[in-house]
Image: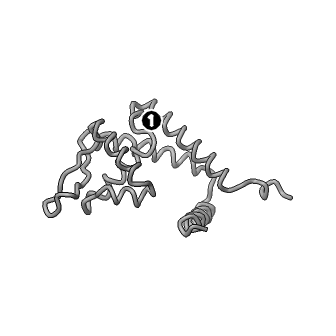
Amino acid sequence: MAEEQKRAIGFELGMINNLIRRTLNQRFSENGLEDLGGVQGPVIGYVYQNSQKQDVFQKDIEKWFKIRRSTATVMLQNMEQKDLIVRVPVPNDGRLKKIVLTEKAKERHMRVKDQIERFHKELEEGISPAEKKQFLEILDRIRANLESGK
């Protein structure tokens, strides 16, 4: 049996995920962005991009990042305590609170964006556009398998 057939995709993806997180957290730390570890940096990016077009709510973050409600609640509370977001009630429904970035979060987003762009260039070095396309198609199939409960 070939060595590639012995390697489990889930295990390999988990290792790569850990390595990506560790590398990004190290770079953020080196650039004074250590408080944006985990998914907080990407959440700021998501809110930054999407709030230009529409209000962003906790349920949107849960859906996009595929996280549980309880996880999103704790993370957003933490981000509020760090003065990265505020939750603002919407006029037509007092129960709904849109997520709004603070100026501190917007400034950090621009710094993080620069770090992420450089990281992606390094990550994709030596990978052709065709290889990247094929890899992303395979990841889409894996995601679909997981979402369908297979």
**Front-most of 72 and 144?**
72
Q: In screen coordinates, is 32 left or right of 51?
A: right
Q: In screen coordinates, is 125 left or right of 1?
A: left
What residue occupies the far right of the structure in this picture?
1
Residue 31 percent across, percent down from the top left: 42, 32
Q: In screen coordinates, is 47 left or right of 38?
A: left
Residue 116 percent across, percent down from the top left: 45, 45
**Front-most of 126 and 9?**
9
Q: In screen coordinates, is 106 left or right of 1?
A: left
As displayed, is residue 140 above or below residue 21? below
Residue 56 visible from this viewpoint: yes
Numbered-mark total: 1
Q: Looking at the image, which residue is at 31% across and 59% down?
A: 50
What residue does disc 1 label? 28
Residue 100 percent across, percent down from the top left: 24, 50
**Front-most of 131 and 64?**
64
Residue 140 percent across, percent down from the top left: 56, 66
Q: Secondary structure at mark 1?
A: helix
Q: In the rendered structure, which amino acid carries the disc numbered 1? A: Phe
As displayed, is residue 44 above or below residue 129? above
Q: Residues within 10 Å of mark 1 (few under 14, many from 20)?
A: many
